Image (cartoon, rainbow, N blue to C red):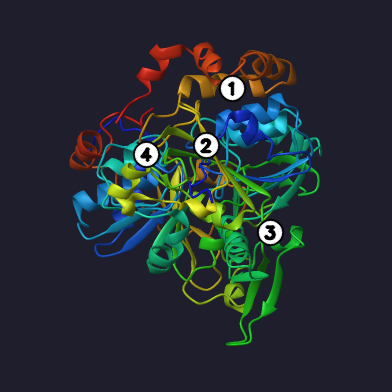
Amino acid sequence: MRIDPYHGNELMAVVLARDLKDGEQGEMGAYSEIPMAACKLARLTHAPNLNWWCSATSYLNSTGPLWHSSTDYRNIVGAEAVLHMNEAIFYAVPHYDFFFLGGIQVDQFGNANLTVVGEWAKPKLRGPGCAALPFVTTMPIRSYIYLTRHDRLSLVKKVDFITGVGFLEGGDSRTKIGLPAGGGPCLVVTPLAAMDFEENSKRMRLKSLHPGVSLEKVIQNTGFDLVLPDSIPETSPPTEEEIRILREEVDPYGVLRG
Amino acid sequence: MNLERRKKVVTMDEALSHISDGCFLAIGGFMVHNHPMGIIREIVKRKIRNLRILPTPPGGSLDADLLIGSGCADAVLASYIGGEWLQPVMPNYRRKAENLELKILEFDEMTILCGLRASAQKLPCEVTRSGLGSDMLKVNPLLKVFNNPITGEPLVAVPAIEPDVAILHAQRSDPYGNLQHAGSVFMDALLAAASKKVIVSVEEIVPLDFIKKDPFRTTIPCHLVTAIVKAPYGAHPCSSHGYYIHDEEHIREYIQSAKNPGPFQQYLNKYVDGPSDLSEYLERVGGIRTLCDLRLY
């Protein structure tokens, strides 16, 4: 049954949650409401053996309510383990299957920019910094990119600064520069659509349109040519049960709807 | 012979004597949590200049922004300066960076971590894969790519990062500097091991016997600590993990002020230069009522 209205952030959390598999390990950083909701939801719907670390503050499988700040100590209260953040590089990160990242800009090959818009030496917009993106994106694990806006400023042909290493210039350019095989983005989720990457070219490809969003709208709001498959399905809207779990068990304070 | 063990508890004034113009200063905590804000306000008040700062890896917020906006810091080595859901990029940091008034050394979390680990181990460098393929390597001349002698694959060498002083905020210490965190330790222990001096503000000083009852809870051992300052609510408006949460209303006021130099100066007058000490500052931000409201679990 279709629940209407649901918040765009709830839809994004649901889309991400459905892609996470039972028995996997994953990671998110600071300010990660949507990914954290996705991991919590996945554990309660189909993946009881999914383990997730919030590497920002470094705690495991917190079952408390969702907070805006993933570094808030109230997350620790419901956690199963807490590490010094610098220890996570031994005990957590190398054992992940996936992680989540965002950016000011993301380009057609899934490279992400969190550092600077314009020239680095003379920035138009100074971003927060490189965060953990250069590190996690060079690991041989898959990444989920999520953006809370979908427009030509955020989805660009070429990022001004490569902070998170996607498929670089496409094809096999990751392994060509000496990165281990197996890494790179697998899915991009925005308020308008879900996208993946074409197998050989590694160009971003439209996967599904969120309910009520037209193909034209996505094309108009994307700063490069997406690969368009012959048939483009609608993203399955959140089920009644998914929304109930989100609102009653994962996010009782409505952080996602805030 | 005097066999009495030396206590490390000092006044704020004595603690500040370790921090001087041109100092390379590392700041503990993370995001809007566990920053030694009381010490930082004193640095601003004393107009210490030409600081090179390392906001705690992975990320700083008001701590770094206050030092940048007030003109104390003119260079930063950082992987993130933002305020999570409250502010994507801290306002003074953004303005000074865009006006080219700030020297930025572009690092990510892993390269900072490697540099600190190298320093802590007294090694010249540590290695990582982080940076390969990213533009961070193009703009940071300190990071060097090389083919490692074991497998031949390219890696990045990060030079040792050794701050002159690390300033931290922890929840408890005994008089000798054995620290306990009541929440996350973040990267404070590594900062302490990597830095030449370590100054810590704490919520409370507890007897050595309290620490000895449960030594598993000691997060930073005393030999790494130079001085302890008793500073209840010394992390405000940031949280002190396990003791009180961040003061969101005040942080919003800070962010709003920091967006323009005029209002920012008024903020400094009211909350940094005006109060004679930490207690008077705490009165100005709402006193006991506000502080009690922040004690949430």
Crowd tier of the residue under label 2, counting other residues whose Cα lies within 10 Å: few below 14, some 14–19, many 20 or above: many
Q: Earlier in the sequence, mark 3 or mark 1?
A: 3
In terms of sequence position, does the residue under pointer 4 or pointer 1 come before the other? 4
**Horizontal arrangement in the rendering, residue B278 relative to residue B131 (left or right):** left
Q: Nearer the viewer, residue A8 or A60?
A: A60
Q: Chain of mark 4?
A: B
Secondary structure at badge 3 equals helix
Q: Residue at x 60, y 20 (%)?
A: B256
Q: Position of residue A87 (x, y in %)?
A: 44, 61
Q: Amino acid at mark 4?
A: Pro
Residue beneath label 4, please?
A: B207
Choose the circle earlier in sequence order: 3 or 2: 2
Q: Position of residue A155 (x, y in %)?
A: 59, 48
Report whether A56 appears left or right of B90: left
Q: Is residue B137 above or below residue B15?
A: below
Relative to B242, say whether A89 is above or below: below
Q: Which residue does the numbered mark 2 point to in the structure image? A: B9
Q: Secondary structure at mark 2?
A: loop
Q: CA distance from mark 2 to mark 4?
A: 12 Å
The amino acid marked with disc number 1 is: Tyr
Badge 1 sits on which subunit?
Answer: B
Specify which label sits upstream in the sequence, 1 or 2. Answer: 2
The amino acid on which the numbered mark 3 sits, given as a three-letter code, is: Met
Query: Marks 3 and 4: CB-CB under 8 Å?
Result: no
Is A258 situated above or below A48? above
